[in-house]
Image: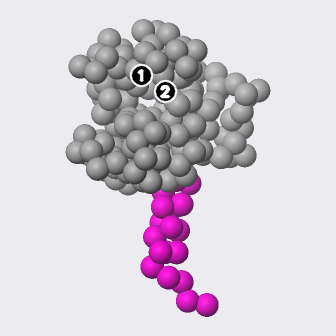
Amino acid sequence: MQVSGLERALGRVQSIMDRFVLSPATTGAGPESQPRANPEPEQTALRTGFGAELDRMIEAESLRQGVAPDLVRAIVQVESGGRTDARSRAGAIGLMQLMPGTASMLGVDPEDPAQNLAGGVRYLRDMAAQFGDLDRTLAAYNAGPGAVRRFNGVPPYAETQNYIQSIRQILDERG
């Protein structure tokens, strides 16, 4: 049986998602699971220049929710540069740049770094579950799931396309 170009491309997309969105079976993640006590970032973790406390928060929350810590680190780096007090012109708040409406929907205080991170990781995980591949997941995180549905894929917005490229570049630098 011959594999088509589309099937090969889908296989590559799935391997990328497998690399960055962890399954509950491999992490023990789920509502009942708890983060490791004082997790230490992996030796091979993405180098961001974040402080040790922020790195530990990202590691613990990512693993608790079944999302690869390096993906979250890359998003935090692009969204806020690791600044807990970051604010965008559009009104997004904190480490993961949650819009007030999204934070409210998630039931988190976007001003609280731990809640902002928890809400952002949960939102990212939810976008991955809805859209299934890294580019559409990142597009939904950046432009909203409605835009991804409306365009049946990554919207033709320069900001969103640059966002995806920036995240991928950070992840590719890690290897």
Which of these two is toward me, 3 or 105?
105
Question: In this view, which residue lies farthest toward the front?
Answer: 150
**Residue appearing at x 50%, y 82% in the figure:** 4
User: Any mark on residue 98, and which?
Assistant: 1
Residue 67 image point, x, y percent: 56, 39
**Residue appearing at x 51%, y 67% in the figure:** 10
Residue 64 seen from this side: yes
Which of these two is toward me, 3 or 136?
136
Q: In this view, does 104 lie above or below 42?
A: above
Residue 43 seen from this side: no
User: Mark 2–mark 1 contact, CB under 8 Å?
Assistant: yes
Three-letter code for the amino acid on which mark 1 is drawn: Leu
**Residue appearing at x 34%, y 48% in the figure:** 155
Give the position of the C terminus as an image quadrant: bottom left
Residue 65 image point, x, y percent: 62, 32
Whether 2 is among the magenta residues is yes
User: Any mark on residue 120, and which?
Assistant: 2
